[in-house]
Image (spheres, rainbow, N blue to C red):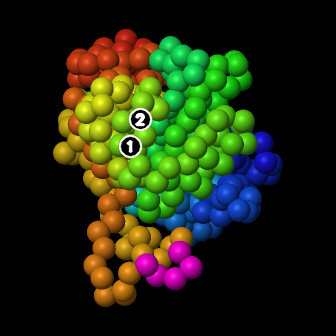
């Protein structure tokens, strides 16, 4: 499978969403066709589709697919049904703001078309979902291009989780620069954290980089300090699930530890994100809800036999918040933002038409 395959898209007849099931990677490449409410919800909750921007793209298509199944013919009944589906999909995962962002954007289309017949509203929802996807592709390319300003031939880049094409569309955010650099003949070496417990780094990041021909080396999460100490890491590149107004950033569990290590070793720590991941409605990281997941993911999911006794307690937060003071810069589609984030994020996005969420 090509690296830039659109792993989330609408089927040709527009009746379903097709995704590459990320839980089966890297061993099996299985496409799923989804159109039922429960299976659409489950695909997000079980991480069949994952990564903040990909969840947003999927949510746009999912709510359209459900709207297209409506039997309602008057606006009020249609809108009530739409809101119910929206709340249901929105409850599938709490941390990545792109989910709510995409659903809100779709709701705005419904409200702006309230005078139109239901069939026309449904058609507009389809156009909006396609636009969300198209814009993500453009944003990823812009982010990856800005990222090229931060690297030199021969650099070693440490990555965490997966912020590539699988998590977005085409290039990705955190991995976009590595993929684009490869196309431009700039040689970068990636050190990929395996990313316990769901192993997105091992299963997905190395899958994408290896297929693209980028030099990548898999390490266990607890090896990052040594690899940094050995001078192999020129910079850390991560994606993110929500950036608060002050620059505090939620990303996959383990990210904040890496940022602390990077500061100790004097290595720049860069966060990559599209404006759809910036939430000006969250003042600081304290306002970000951290998803807690099933303890079985730690003890059982990727092992042949459980690795701890059944009665052993587990704590499984899926994300952590990296303090803005540890972030060297945030790379967005509008440019590279440096501290003070509160001021500079607002300035950049206010000047560019206020596209970021809730500005
Ligand atoms: O739980 P996941 O796999 O959805 O977590 C994903 C991440 O933490 C990514 O780094 C983030 O969504 C950015 S993807 C461009």
Q: Position of residue 91 (x, y in %)?
A: 40, 61
Vertical order, 356 against 352 (above or below): below
Q: Which residue is mark 1?
A: 226
Q: Which residue is mark 2?
A: 230
Can residue 197 be seen from the camera position used here? yes
Mark 1 CB in 8 Å range of ligand 1? no
Can residue 72 be seen from the camera position used here? no
Nearer to the camera, 265 or 49: 265
Vertical order, 47 against 64 (above or below): below
Mark 2 is surrounded, within 10 Å at the Cα level, by few (under 14), some (14 to 19) or many (20 or more) other residues, namely: few
Vertical order, 130 against 122 (above or below): above
Is residue 17 shown left or right of residue 321? right
Label 2: element kind: loop
Q: Position of residue 128 (x, y in %)?
A: 59, 37
Is residue 321 shown left or right of residue 188? left
The Cα atoms of the two marked residues, 2 and 1, are separated by 6 Å
Q: Residue at x 73, y 63 (%)?
A: 28
- Name the quarter where the C terminus is drawn: top left
Q: Position of residue 13 (x, y in %)?
A: 80, 51
Magenta: main secondary structure: loop
Q: Quadrant of residue 88 in the image?
A: bottom left
Nearer to the camera, 154 or 127: 154
Q: Residue at x 61, y 47 (%)?
A: 206
Label 1: element kind: helix
Q: Residue at x 44, y 63 (%)?
A: 197
Highlighted magenta segment, given as a residue range: 303-307
Q: Position of residue 265 (x, y in %)?
A: 30, 31
- The numbered disc on residue 216 is none
Nearer to the camera, 120 or 329: 329
């Amino acid at each position: 499978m090509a690296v830039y395959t659109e792993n989330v898209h609408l089927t040709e007849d527009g009746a379903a969403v097709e995704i590459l099931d990320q839980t089966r990677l890297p061993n099996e490449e299985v496409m799923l066709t989804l159109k039922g409410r429960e299976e659409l919800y489950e695909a997000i909750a079980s991480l069949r589709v994952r990564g903040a921007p990909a969840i947003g793209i999927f949510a746009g298509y999912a709510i359209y697919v459900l709207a297209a199944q409506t039997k309602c013919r008057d606006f009020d009944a249609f809108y009530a049904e739409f809101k119910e589906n929206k709340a249901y999909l929105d409850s599938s995962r709490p941390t990545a703001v792109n989910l709510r962002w995409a659903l809100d954007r779709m709701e705005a289309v419904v409200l702006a078309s309230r005078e139109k017949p239901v069939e026309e509203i449904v058609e507009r929802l389809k156009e909006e979902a396609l636009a969300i996807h198209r814009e993500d592709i453009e944003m990823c390319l812009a982010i990856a291009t800005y990222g090229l300003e931060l690297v030199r031939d021969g650099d070693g880049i440490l990555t965490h989780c997966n912020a590539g094409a699988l998590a977005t569309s085409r290039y990705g955010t955190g991995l976009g620069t590595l993929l684009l650099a490869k196309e431009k003949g700039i040689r970068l070496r990636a050190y990929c954290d395996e990313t316990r417990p769901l192993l997105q780094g091992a299963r997905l990041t190395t899958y994408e980089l290896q297929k693209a021909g980028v030099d990548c080396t898999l390490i266990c999460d607890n090896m990052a300090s040594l690899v940094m100490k050995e001078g192999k890491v020129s910079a850390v590149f991560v994606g993110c699930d929500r950036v608060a107004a002050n620059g505090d950033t939620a990303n996959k569990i383990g990210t904040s530890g890496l940022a602390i290590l990077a500061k100790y070793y004097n290595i720049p720590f860069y966060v990559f994100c599209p404006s759809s991941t910036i939430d000006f409605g969250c003042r600081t990281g304290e306002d970000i809800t951290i998803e807690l997941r099933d303890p079985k993911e730690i003890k059982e999911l990727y092992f042949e036999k459980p690795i701890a006794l059944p009665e052993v307690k587990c704590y499984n937060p899926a994300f952590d918040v990296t303090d803005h003071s540890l972030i060297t810069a945030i790379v967005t589609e509008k440019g590279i933002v440096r501290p003070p984030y509160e001021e500079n994020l607002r300035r950049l996005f206010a000047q560019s038409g206020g596209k970021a969420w809730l500005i």
